[in-house]
Image: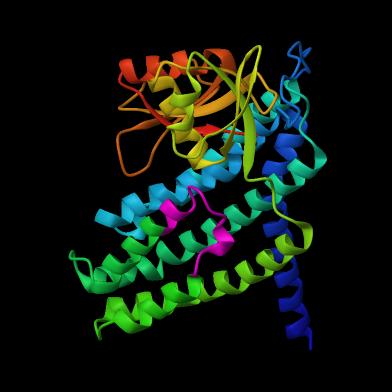
Amino acid sequence: MRFLWRWLKRLALALLVVVVLLALPVIRNETMCRGTPLAQDHAPIVGQTRDESRTFTTYPEWHIVHAYADYARVIAKDDPHDFGFFTAMRGFWSSLCPLTEMADQHGGFTTESKMTIYTIGVSFTAELALKAAYEETLGRVATWIRGPEHSTLDQLSAQQAADYAAFLQQTPWYKWDFAADAQALDDTATDAFRDRERRLALGLEYRAKAAYAGVIANAVAATGTDELTLRAVVTGMTETQLTAIPGVTVIQRRPEGWEIETPRYRELTQILARIAQDGGQMVEIAGNDDILLTAITDGPADLGAIFTFPMQGSDQVRHLVVVKVPDLAGRLRDLAAGGARLEHIHDY
């Protein structure tokens, strides 16, 4: 009985340590990352507005999307243990601090947004920590046994990771068919040791995610999904030019320019890039005059970013840049001219 009690205490202590470690980044962000509210002098033109602070609070989810893309890029040529799991975790929490400060300056970081971001941040951290614990130990041993050449399931899992990363650009993660990925592992596996190990390890991971995704999907269905479109005002283009852009619906002509409706997320980035390319200029987006974008450069560069960090699996660098909406089109043209590449414009 004493033996059992001793191990129960050790388990409780270990769980407490895990909880404290997961809570530390949250505590740091709450106590050390604060911004001073700024006076907002922009009067919205359109009636369908969204909180300006959301351009900053949407990035953390995209950091996770980028991390999965980095992971896919790494395992396409190397192995999972070559991915910097803790680098990805650190990037999430390090970027959140300046983003929190900016959100505070532009209307405030709502409690709801904080709870969402802290929840996904802790989940992301726990997931990568568990994955690192396996891939750095048993997974690494399996690659030693396999040898230098990727196995059949190494190749399949790399393709699955790339497809998943691309899927996340426009669609919530919980809509991905993890069960199909697990079944594909079963159908494709050979008798090679590495394939059997990948089938077991990744199969368990995919099936666990499939179950969790079902829970999240039901929760989202109960609470409702976010709006999938937004309104913006554009000048410097004709109605014909705007309607020629896929996804753009012209609503009406206003004194300030054309009011349009567009999809959000990845499609919005493509639309805004097209408007800039065609010589247009944004007046406001969702009633706001500040917006966050990410840009990619080949190596270090000074883009006036609030946060910059290297991408894994390449020599490129990601920059988080805040731009005034009326300056957005010009900034996009400058990025292209300067050799930088627009990655994503973070809407509200």
Q: Is residue 73 above or below residue 11?
A: above
Percent across and percent down for residue 8 are: 75, 77
Residue shown at the point (34%, 20%) measured from the top left: 336
Quadrant of image for the C terminus? top right
Magenta part of the chain: 164-177
Q: In this image, 104 relative to 93: left or right?
A: right
Q: Residue at x 51, y 64 (%)?
A: 176
Q: Is residue 170 magenta?
A: yes
Residue at 38% x, 21% y is 277
Left or right: 27, with 80 as reference point: right
Closer-to-camera residue (208/280) = 280
Question: Residue 82: x percent and y percent?
Answer: 34, 53
Which residue corresponds to the image point at 41% horizontal and 49% vertical from the top-left?
69
167 relative to 318, above or below? below
Can the viewer see residue 123 in this picture?
yes
Relative to residue 196, is residue 67 depicted above or below? above
**Residue 305 lies in the magenta-colored region:** no
Residue 338 seen:
no
Q: Quadrant of the N terminus?
A: bottom right
Instruction: Check the image and tell me how it is coloured.
Output: rainbow
Q: Position of residue 265 (x, y in %)?
A: 54, 41
